Image: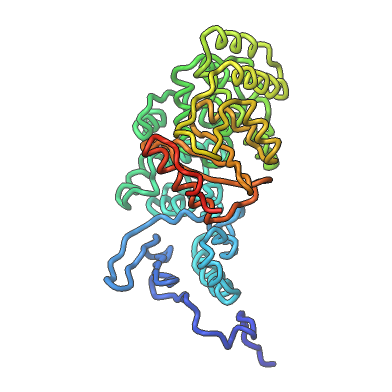
Amino acid sequence: MRQLELNLIPRTEHKREAAPWKYRFTKDSLVEEFEGRRLVYGLWELLFGCWIVDPVTQQSREIIPTWRPLNENGIWRDQREIRAHVSHSQRTALSSRWRYAANAAFAGYFANIPQWLRLLAAPFEHYQWLALDLIWQDHRFSRFLDDELFNEREQFVFSCCVLADAAEQSRAWRHEFAGALMTEKRAALLDKLSGLPCSKATMRAIYKLGPTPCSKKVYQGLINFVNDHPISKVLRHANLIPPGVINVLEQLPRELLQTNIVNILLKDLDFVASNAENKETKLEVSVDNLAGLFAMAPPKLKTAIANSFRQVRDLDQLFSYMDRWENRLIEAIRFPPPPVPSVANLVPLSSAAAMREEARQMQNCLASLIPYVLQERAYFFHWDDTVPATVMLENTPGCGWSFYRALGVGNEPILQKTENSLRSLISESARSGYGCRVGQIAR
């Protein structure tokens, strides 16, 4: 019986033009060519790594890829899933022919890496290439990493990699880094890499951040809290510290970082659940609004807020208190004047009541943006014309006030010509310091 060849290319695609990509193995690497870019992946058994090669000059530079090649079981992922974030022009080129060729190439490439080593690298997520590199750099590192994962101390390795920007360092630096992780005292190494004082208490807190890498901001925030903050005792006694909690705690004013508030956030384990993203986002927005307004509040009102927060007993009550005080602060803080001179037909929304009425008439969420206006991060106008619009100006550091967006009823886009004219009108008004003629706006 004759065995038929395994043809991975759909019959309908045989007649297409030559693909803008190519995968080929050489004696020491896998070469990927895509849209004029060449990537060379060194084989595990020879010289593991990844290099970008200029196809014209043939000059190369080593990189640590940040895409996640492996799933939680250490098995290579579908390349289309991996590269779903690429630009629209690239996505059109990612045909099923490319998918078959890429998957076959990387299956062959990763199959040469022992499965148990791939399994060790899997928890590193976007640092998986870095983990494999460190394992390849020093043969002792795999046993060390296996022990760290078994004892749930992987956050030590994660935090050192993130704080040191290890993926951006040279090959020689990474070799020394792998040795340092295994041999140097942990608190001293983290101290050196982060530039912040670290102790055994710091390490114990970092171990509680869960099984996946966190951002540099989370690690730095946690170290700062453990070092010098009244809530450090609460963090030391927690069984788990969800990374999202650190982001929220960093936003809260120091006067509101009370033991009961921290305990509420730490006990709400929904932060680490996959379906809790909306709750965490809502909390971060509420805390951001309250923190900005709190900084502008008079001392007596700050004291009243801090005292009332001591009565909070659960997350729902925390949301209720934040909403209540946000509304109170909105009424107490003076509304800022318009950042640009008045222009006919362009009416500044110079009070909280005016913004709420605009939200009602224009069917948008403008009322929720009042805190941004009070903090002078944004300002809004009503464009009173045949086709009305809500106009937003944005205040950016170093650039000042500028036109950001104009939307119609229900956030429907307006004519591009009208938006361009509004942009020019506001820019000219800001420069000249006096109003412009209505006829300058295109209808």
Residue 250 spot, x, y in % from top left: 51, 26
**Does 434 sit left or right of 55 as displayed?**
right
Residue 203 spot, x, y in % from top left: 48, 28
Instruction: Give 376 or 139, whichever is nearer the viewer.
Output: 376
Q: Which residue is at a point 64% across and 26% down the rendered structure image?
A: 353
Instruction: Give 306 or 26, whichever is nearer the viewer.
Output: 306
**Does 15 sit left or right of 48 as displayed?**
right
Q: Residue furthest bottom?
A: 1
Residue 317 spot, x, y in % from top left: 71, 20
Instruction: Give 280 or 203, whichever is nearer the viewer.
Output: 280
- In the rendered view, tell whether residue 395 sits above or below residue 111: above
Residue 352 spot, x, y in % from top left: 61, 26
Q: Which residue is at a point 68% across and 11% down the rendered structure image?
A: 311
Q: Which residue is at a point 60% across and 15% down the rendered structure image?
A: 259
Q: Is residue 247 visible?
A: yes
Q: Quadrant of residue 161?
A: top left
- In the rendered view, tell whether residue 3 sits above or below residue 77: below
Q: Which residue is at a point 31% across and 51% down the rendered structure image?
A: 170
- In the rendered view, tell whether residue 303 sits above or below residue 406: above
